[in-house]
Amino acid sequence: MHISITKTTYKGKTHRCTLLRETYVDKHGKRQKHTLGNLSKADPRMIELIKGHLAGIDYMEVNQAFEITQSRIHGPAMAVLKAFDKLHFQHLIGSTASRERDLVCAMVAARIVRPQTKLSTTRWWDTTTFAEHFNVVDAKVDELYGAMDWLLTRQNRIQGKLARRHLNDGDLVLYDLSSSYFEGECCALARYGYNREKKRGKLQQVNYELLCDRLGHPVSISVHPGNVSDTVTLTAELRRLQRRFALSKVVVVGDRGMIATAQIEALRQYTDFKWISALKSQTIRKLMRDGMIDAGDTTSLVEVHHPQFPNERLLVCRNAALAKRRLHKREALLEATEVLLDEIGEAVEQKRLQGGAQIGLKLGQVIGRYKMKKHFVWKIDDTSFTYHRNEHSIGDEAKLDGVYVIRTSVSAQDMSAPECVRAYKSLCGVERAFRTIKTMHLKVRPIHHWRSDRVRAHLFICMLAYYVQWHMREAWRPLTFADPNLRDDAQVRDPVAAAKRSSDALRKVHTGLLEDGTPAHSFDTLLDNLATIVRNQCRVPGTAASFQMDTQATDWQKKALGLLDDICAVAYQCQRIGTKR
């Protein structure tokens, strides 16, 4: 039997027929063909199967041909490894291949995709292709600790490479300090300090400071005991920056809590260091009393000079939208405080609360809850309690609504007033780094390590993970809810006014869709989508023969992976990635 394809012409039209035939020899010795059936309307795949069977090919069911013995998540590994390759990340960690370098890179990759403890990481690797790529399938948790110790000895060298990539003399350096709490009470760095996270029951903490360039690339991280003040570390860190990174001219940008008067006096000793910071509200209020700031002026940006700040510029900024928000918030807090005070008055009136001492004690418990104590005046005796708002105090504070003053030592020739405002607002880059490192994305906390050097290494790994993730986020902007025009608009819009989303970003937010109609993603859901690409280990039943088969990526997944090609280390300011200094 065989498949025969014939063509016939009828009424000027050609018809193609697929026939199943058999050939035989008749009684006269001639070869004849006998048609067994017409397969013209059959599925082409069925026709191919019949051809193969007639040719002697043995077919079997798929589950009889091979079996899948293991499936591992491969898509996120493809994305992270591609970012590693574009950033020359392994060469950044160490120019020579080693077991420790592989373990460190694997820990950084795991921190990006699935942040968890080191012990859990060794269990999770087996479910992905990370362990196979970095050859750490058999890695034990003690080896990870040893690699962390090795990484810590190379921290200065790695941070020097990052500085040469992203910093030049005269560049902006963003500086801030944060803290995270500990599990346990055995770490030498753990101290009782100011808890920025308001985490009850987690009083012991560690402080760490982060240096970033103007775009938010993390360059350096330093770790300090939990009771170290924000203002103590600045001068020492800048000295280290000047000595280690060979940057003599740097503009340091810090918030009003980090770069205060005492720190500025110390910075004056370094003529090649300039700073951009802001004044605290009590100082702004004093400038208003001195007439340096006109409370009735509505100009968004005014530059003034004051003898109290020699060789400095004061940039008075007025944001109308911020003023409205502060007015609304203050009124809400005043009303919330009045509710508490009315409860006290009601208790006194009903004689459930008597005596001036007891009434004062109850008042002290609630008056500062919303930090509105300064805006109220009260009168207490043994049988009565009355209060009213301090309109004078409220009016004085209202004059500061929407007003902030930037303080800088950078000359007008080097940086204009709008550029100084934009530079100060760029602090959101280092704040974004802290949010990413501390929250659900990289989960630096809670810290389970006890040894001080392990805590430092853990925080350094989180910083390196954020460095890679920063580039991945930027490359994936077209696929996420991020505003693609934010940075371009920043150079032309009013530097004082709050940033507004572009029409493209608003459309993505309202519809949840991209321009091509596909869903918009966050960074995490994008990684989850790539996780549907798996690597299957297949085996032929009854034999030792095996092979690997990856899930075919969809067009959308191919686009996501292709966007990572935009990460290009050649575009860095300094390309001497492996050069030692």
Image (tube, grey):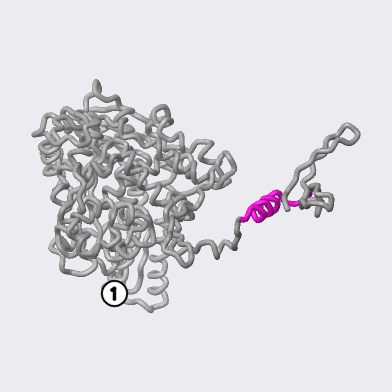
Asked where in the image residue 413 lies, by quadrant, the reply is: top left
Q: Residue furthest top?
A: 413
Residues in magenta? 41-56
Q: Which residue is mark 1?
A: 358
Answer left or right for 183 relative to 300.
left
Prevalent SS, magenta region: helix
Look at the image and say whether residue 47 sits in the magenta stretch. Answer: yes
Q: Is residue 491 magenta?
A: no
Q: Secondary structure at mark 1?
A: helix
Q: Is residue 461 among what the camera can see?
A: yes
Towards the viewer: 554 or 568: 554
- Nearer-the-camera pick, 471 or 400: 471
| Residue found at x 10% / y 37% | 243
Amino acid type of the residue that numbered disc 1 sits on in the rendered structure: Gln
Observer-nearest of 95 and 185: 95
The answer to which quarter of the image holds residue 198 is: bottom left
